[in-house]
Image (tube, grey):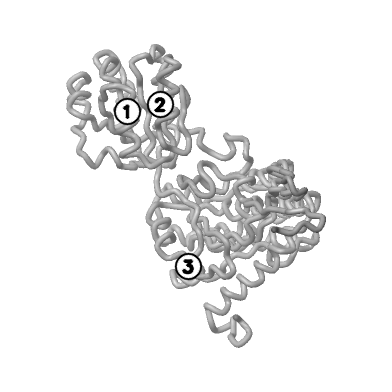
């Protein structure tokens, strides 16, 4: 495909050359050993610490550009790298190296009556494309997970972290290749602008799967344009249902406070609270007082406002039930019981993370079985929906799809499988 084009002057040609190189690297990576991949990750981690000064110098350029562009405080905070943060990124790579190898596991094995043995074996996906915003640590986290799982990766970071991403990618790529890692296993798209992204999303001949990480706007744009499979979640409209048999109010308020207030701008933060009508007369005033003390704006339905201090609760509108606020704002609705709570969540939720607070085992199981989300909790904060908290090490992202992965994505989710069939001359009659 790239035989008669010039990558120096032709953007499409340059990107396809990256794709072809990644495809070649992925085939070599799929045959590499666990020890080899772990060695490369540790070499990358050491290089990050050794090159900290160079990485910080690049990060200063991004921060200076951010100031000129007037980026908001939250986006600037996500950009900042420090010696401690770089060490944390390096340590995360070392941790990934200690995790079990997902490649080559025999998932099942059967022997047919005719003597054929059929093994279902885990294999890498191949070439993974990742499009992400803001956080330069994703450059290393994503690359580390891909290498450990035997995949080549093409990274396309946001323009706001351009210099930081370049420095980080060059550092780990050089270190890995010096240790024998296949050339072009890790590549960072060096081109700014939307045209490069649009072209990348049409490269299904080279890229096996695309993973967008960022806001809903970015993810929808990727899905609309991509010709390869996309693993994603659009948003996190997460719920907590307070059941009539929730008897530990202190625990309930603590869980609600953590889910809403610890980091309100992330996808696993609480957005809607549902209160059982049997608990509402007593629980609603306590909930309103607690949320007000935390600086949370409450948007409640008419029933909740009647039980709570209506002056402290803004009337909710229909749009609130499907709203991802990503801020210290929460909607509250009173429902008739667990069945209505499940119906509400399945209608208005995003399939991300939802929770029931109750001491009733039967009601909890009804909720856990009935809510159609990637992660469903009983008496615990939705903030635990995270690869690290699930014991996966670093996280590639969170999927609300049902094919081929769902929920937090770690190493195992970056593998597919194939069938190996062992015969002794069998033919089909």
Tags 2 and 3 in contact by the CB under 8 Å rule? no
Q: Is residue 273 above or below residue 2?
A: above
Q: Is residue 365 left or right of residue 59?
A: left
Residue at 68% from the left image edge and 49% from the top image edge: 122
Percent coordinates x, y for residue 344 in the rendering: 30, 33
Q: Nearer the viewer, residue 247 or 134?
A: 247
Q: Alpha carbon of mark 2 to alpha carbon of mark 1: how far?
A: 8 Å
- Sequence-wise, which precedes: disc 1 or disc 3? 3
Q: Secondary structure at mark 2?
A: helix
Tags 2 and 1 in contact by the CB under 8 Å rule? yes
- Sequence-wise, which precedes: disc 2 or disc 1? 1
Circle 3 residue: 197
Q: Nearer the viewer, mark 1 or mark 3?
A: 1
Q: Alpha carbon of mark 1 to alpha carbon of mark 3: how far?
A: 40 Å
Q: Residues within 10 Å of mark 2 (few under 14, many from 20)?
A: many
Q: Secondary structure at mark 1?
A: helix
Q: Quadrant of the C terminus?
A: bottom right
Residue at 48% from the left image edge and 56% from the top image edge: 133
Residue 341: image tag: 1
Q: Secondary structure at mark 3?
A: helix
Circle 2 residue: 367
Q: Nearer the viewer, residue 244 or 141?
A: 244
Q: Is residue 85 above or below residue 23?
A: above
Percent coordinates x, y for residue 128 in the rendering: 59, 59
Q: Is residue 420 left or right of residue 79?
A: right
Percent coordinates x, y for residue 157 in the rendering: 52, 60
Q: Alpha carbon of mark 2 to alpha carbon of mark 3: how far?
A: 41 Å
**For residue 314, what is the image quadrant?**
top left
Q: Quadrant of the N terminus?
A: bottom right
Q: Residues within 10 Å of mark 3 (few under 14, many from 20)?
A: some
């Amino acid at each position: 495909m790239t035989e008669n084009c010039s990558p120096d002057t032709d953007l499409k040609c340059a990107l396809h050359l990256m794709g072809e190189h990644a495809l070649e690297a992925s085939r070599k990576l799929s045959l590499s050993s666990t020890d080899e991949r772990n060695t490369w990750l540790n070499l990358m981690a050491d290089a990050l610490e050794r090159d900290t000064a160079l990485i910080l110098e690049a990060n200063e350029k991004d921060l200076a550009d951010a100031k000129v562009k007037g980026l908001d405080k939250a986006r600037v905070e996500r950009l900042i790298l420090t010696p401690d943060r770089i060490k944390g990124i390096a340590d995360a790579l070392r941790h990934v190296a200690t995790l079990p190898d997902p490649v080559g596991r025999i998932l099942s094995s059967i022997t047919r009556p005719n003597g054929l043995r059929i093994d279902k074996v885990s294999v890498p996906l191949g070439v993974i494309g990742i499009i992400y915003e803001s956080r330069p640590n994703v450059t290393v986290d994503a690359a580390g997970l891909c290498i450990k799982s035997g995949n080549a990766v093409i990274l396309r970071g946001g323009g706001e972290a351009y210099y930081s991403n370049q420095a980080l990618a060059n550092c780990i790529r050089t270190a890995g290749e010096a240790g024998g890692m296949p050339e072009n296993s890790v590549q960072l798209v060096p081109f700014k602008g939307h045209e490069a992204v649009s072209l990348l999303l049409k490269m299904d001949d080279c890229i096996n799967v695309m993973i967008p990480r960022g806001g809903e706007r970015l993810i929808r744009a990727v899905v609309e344009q991509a010709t390869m499979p996309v693993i994603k979640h659009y948003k996190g409209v997460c719920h907590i249902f307070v059941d009539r048999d929730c008897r530990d109010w202190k625990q309930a308020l603590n869980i609600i406070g953590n889910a809403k207030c610890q980091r309100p701008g992330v996808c696993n933060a609480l957005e809607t609270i549902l209160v059982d009508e049997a608990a509402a007369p007593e629980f609603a005033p306590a909930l309103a007082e607690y949320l007000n003390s935390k600086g949370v704006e409450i948007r409640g339905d008419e029933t909740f406002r009647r039980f709570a201090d209506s002056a402290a609760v803004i009337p909710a509108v229909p749009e609130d039930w499907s709203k991802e606020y990503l801020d210290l704002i929460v909607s509250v609705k009173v429902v008739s019981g667990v069945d209505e709570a499940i119906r509400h969540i399945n209608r208005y939720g995003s399939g991300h993370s939802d929770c029931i607070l109750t001491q009733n085992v039967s009601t909890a199981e009804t909720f856990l079985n009935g809510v159609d989300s990637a992660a469903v909790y009983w008496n615990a904060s939705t903030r635990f929906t995270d690869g690290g908290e699930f014991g996966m090490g670093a996280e590639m992202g969170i999927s609300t799809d049902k094919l081929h992965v769902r929920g937090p994505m770690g190493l195992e989710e970056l593998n597919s499988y194939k069938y190996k069939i062992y015969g002794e001359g069998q033919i089909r009659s």
